[in-house]
Image (spheres, rainbow, N blue to C red):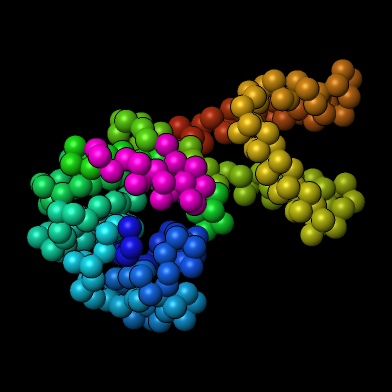
Amino acid sequence: MKKIGFIGGGALAESIIRGISGKVFEANDIFISEIRPERCAELVERYGVNASPETNFLDAVDLLIVAVKPKDAMKTFGELKGKIPASTLITYTVAGLKIANVEKFFPANKIVRIMPNVAVSVGESMTAYTLNEFASRDGDTIKNFWSTLGRAVEVDEKLMDAVTGLSGSGPAYAFLMIDALSDGGVAAGLSRSMAIELAAQTLLGAAKMVLQGEHPDVLRDKVTSPAGTTIEGVRVMERGGVRSALIEAVLAATEKSRSL
């Protein structure tokens, strides 16, 4: 792929642009269609990309990412109907929108439903994707692209709402935990800046250990000594319902995705 286009220049699109600009694509090969002229000016100034309210780049890009709000999605796809070559990979990040509904506008196009998260801006996104029949041969292309920005996995479309509830919304849960842990550190006597750094690096390190292959329960047991400090903290968290609250958060976000 040599050129990439975006429909929508909001926060998620900017996160992706930040992650790929100068690394996966040169700035001159990144095109954004955004209806707000002032937002276009911001993106041009920050990243040196091509940004305007126009969509005159559709014939030139190999990969198109539609990153608009759910309420604007159907109107946006209607405006794009008949304008995108069959060779272009159409991908979209709209939560809750099934591929079948997009295929009504592009019955012969390659379509990929994508759910990344905001960590794409630092190259650590967890991205799930579903391919339609025409895009079935492009799975490696999609996986390779999103793997440069973190991790990528193909899933059945019926699981995409669960992905949205877990990894799509998950960074917010992690930010909340880091904030709460840093509050605990401040309460225990640490400076705010030190507490935030300690909390963030602790979650980062723990996540990397899990991604190396061991189950989190096994790892927790390894660091939980009998009658020690860690089990005392875990006991308080269990009593406070932290585990249950996280489970319910994922389920609630999943249901919200389905309702969209």
* Camera-side residue of 83 and 198: 83
- Residue at left offset 32%, top offset 65%: 3
Res 202 → quadrant:
top right
- Residue at left offset 41%, top offset 33%: 162
Res 34 → quadrant:
bottom left
| Residue 146 part of the magenta segment | yes
Quadrant of the frame with the C terminus: top left
From the viewer's perspective, is 14 left or right of 101? right
Residue 189 in sight in this render: yes
Q: Main secondary structure of the magenta part?
A: helix
Question: x and y percent of residue 242 in the render?
Answer: 65, 32
Residue that extends furthest to the top in the rendered view of this protein: 226
* Camera-side residue of 141 and 74: 141
Question: x and y percent of residue 10 in the render?
Answer: 40, 65
Compared to 175, does 250 lie above or below? above
- What stretch of residues is rendered in magenta? 136-153
